Amino acid sequence: MSNEILGEALPFDEKIVLKSWAHRNVSEQEYLEYHRKSVENFKESWESVAKELEWFTPWEKVMEETQNKNVYKWFVGGTTNISYLSLDRHVKTWRRHKVAYIWEGEPVDDQGRPKEVRKYTYYDLWREVNRVAYAMKTKLGLKKGDRIAIYLPMIPELPIVMLAAARLGVIFTVIFSGFTAENIASRVNDLNATLIFTADGVYRRGKILKLKEIVDQSLNLTPSVKRVIVVRRLGGEVQLGQRDVLLEELLRDVPSNAYVEPERMESNETLYVLYTSGTTGKPKGMIHDHGGYATLLHATMKWVFDARDDDVYFCTADIGWVTGHSYIVFGPLIEGLTSILYEGTLDTPAPDRWWSIVERYGVTILYTSPTGVRTLMKFGEDYVKKHDLSTLRVIHSVGEPINPSAWRWLFQVVGNGRAPVGSTWWMTETGGIMISHLPGLMLVPMKPGTNGYPLPGVEADVLDESGNPVRPGERGYLVLKNPWPGMPAAPTGIWGDHERYVKTYWSKYPGLFYAGDYAVKDKDGYIWVAGRADEVMKVSGHRIGTYELESVLVSHRAVSEAAVIGVPDQVKGEVPIAYVVLKVGNQPSEEMRKELMDWIRNNYGPIGLPKALFFVTKLPKTRSGKIMRRLIRSVATNSPLGDITSLEDVGSVDEVKQAYDEFVKSIK
Ligand code: WTA
């Protein structure tokens, strides 16, 4: 568990220097010296990045703490609008007719070619965003500060609606299109959103997923929602209720040259709220702003991705998660890049879909996930070799630790040993990348699986329980030591819950941002994030609280108690397994197991499905009644049980163990 990722030892001493990257290669000392200076003057460092963007009015102060503790404002008093930065700024230049997005739908013809491809230039995108903003403003009466939810799949209308809302200062929350009605409702209710954008459906893995029906189910639980705007993706008839209207209807008489002046947003005013799972309770709505967030994205697009005007950029994430917000929508658009938007899954129709996209459009920058890589590795190299990937020049992964063999595969098989490959560490909370190799700035020797050094201006460390830095090679907790632009924003960091914000991130080590991750720092100072240190799982890179799945399970009529833990998985990184105690009068059976699995699928979504679900008569608990997940995890990972003196009933561990052993036997 200590110095390994998925059972592979961390190669602390392996250093790879790319000859082809000689123009950026530096030694560790050179970077550390540069970094030291940037951190000493971190405000000035970030200020110089912010100056590269366009502001309607300049800021009066670079940074200040607000009256709400640990909430910081950046570029105070400066005004801008991220929709202006993403669109108008380019439309004024030669980039006006540069392609912003190439969208590819999932379905293919019998030659394996995509049936639908749509291209948007910056001018096209700007026009569409203005038309949607115009309709939002004049027909739906939306204005700055109003809140909406967006439950759209990977179609161009998703970024268009996000940018239109941003333009008006309308606060939006995007809800991942794999989530269920309950997930929609809890987010909509927390934000008190009055309107939902959705689609009739989407193509996923060759099937149709009817999103509008899921929204309809959620509407019984969301009294605040007055209107539902439906994008027609599938093309057929859409059943419309009283509050529903088709986006195309709404836009029908909006002039093609409609223009909406972008709202002058004070740098710290809210752009969006994105919900993410924590240890307990409902998902937290992390707030991000316009100015600081745009600054961080601009910096990281340059330093991490080496973004240039001749690049074609492909991020394989879903816009429903933070990676897509920052690195499919706002980051690449701020840089004026051409990027790929792909609707579907990586193996439809075959496990070379991503590689065919790289070849078709000459992708130069690839941003992907360890789970994606491990999935494709299983299918062998032939699927990669079939395609010309020689255009690739920078590759990064994100979302979970990347095991060294997956890193090597990206480096050698996909990148052919020519492209730098990195693992960018960050979180929904940080808004953008914090720890990463920086091939666009200075490239230190790479090591397979490491995150590398913190970015300029970012100070990170690995601490023990009492707050002292751990020795090189030892595991501790990752912290960030300075505020940064793009951090959870004013007024409260977490939407409506400042207290929770302080408690979750700033209390374990007062004054430092606690990420909730285990990490190791090696003797060169490279950071290797090794996984979550709390009750949060990363399942295929998706962030899921064990508590959320337990809540879903105990809401079933037959369930009395449930414990969910994450266990390592060679493809998905981590998967949930569940232990369930049934209420008296219910018997464990295959039918019951299936019923509970369906219950999770329908009430949380397929991404939360446990790999195994066991019935037990009791769970290991402390005398005060707390479930001892640590013990359950030890059983499932075959590691020593450790201290069990507070355990109430030793027999409960035996039962958990027996259930697990039987499961292992059954899958062998
Ligand atoms: C994990 C995703 C190791 C980590 C952008 C973090 C990583 C959580 C990496 C945030 C990486 C993300 N190496 N671990 N390169 N990137 N993580 O909010 O545990 O979905 O705390 O944001 O993902 O997940 P989130």
Image (spheres, rainbow, N blue to C red):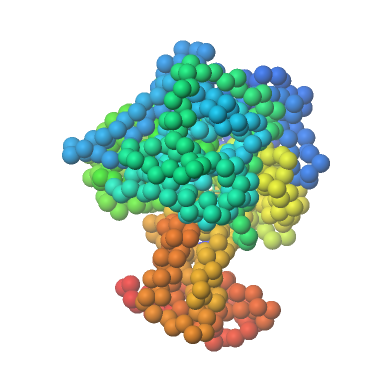
Residue 533 as seen in the image, left or right of residue 588: right
Q: Is residue 627 above or below residue 287?
A: below
Residue 234, quarter of picture: top left
The residue nearer to you, when weighing 184 against 415, is 184
The quarter of the picture where residue 418 lies is: top left
Q: What residue is shown at x 61% (from left), y 79% (from top)? A: 621
Seen from the viewer's position, the closer of residues 193 and 582 is 193
From this viewpoint, which residue is outermost toward the right? 67
Please indicate, yes or no, whether residue 117 appears anywhere in the rendered image.
yes
Q: In the rendered view, tell whether residue 19 sits above or below residue 502.
A: above
Locate residue 242 relative to residue 48 in the image: left or right.
Answer: left
Q: Residue 602: x percent and y percent?
A: 44, 60
Q: Is residue 116 above or below residue 406?
A: above
Residue 501 position within the rendered picture, expressed as x and y whole percent measured from the top left? 70, 50
Residue at left 39%, top 59%?
Answer: 570
Residue at position x 60%, y 31% in the image: 141
* Residue 552 image point, x, y percent: 52, 65
Residue 458 shows in this picture: no
* Side of 127 where 32 appears, left or right: right
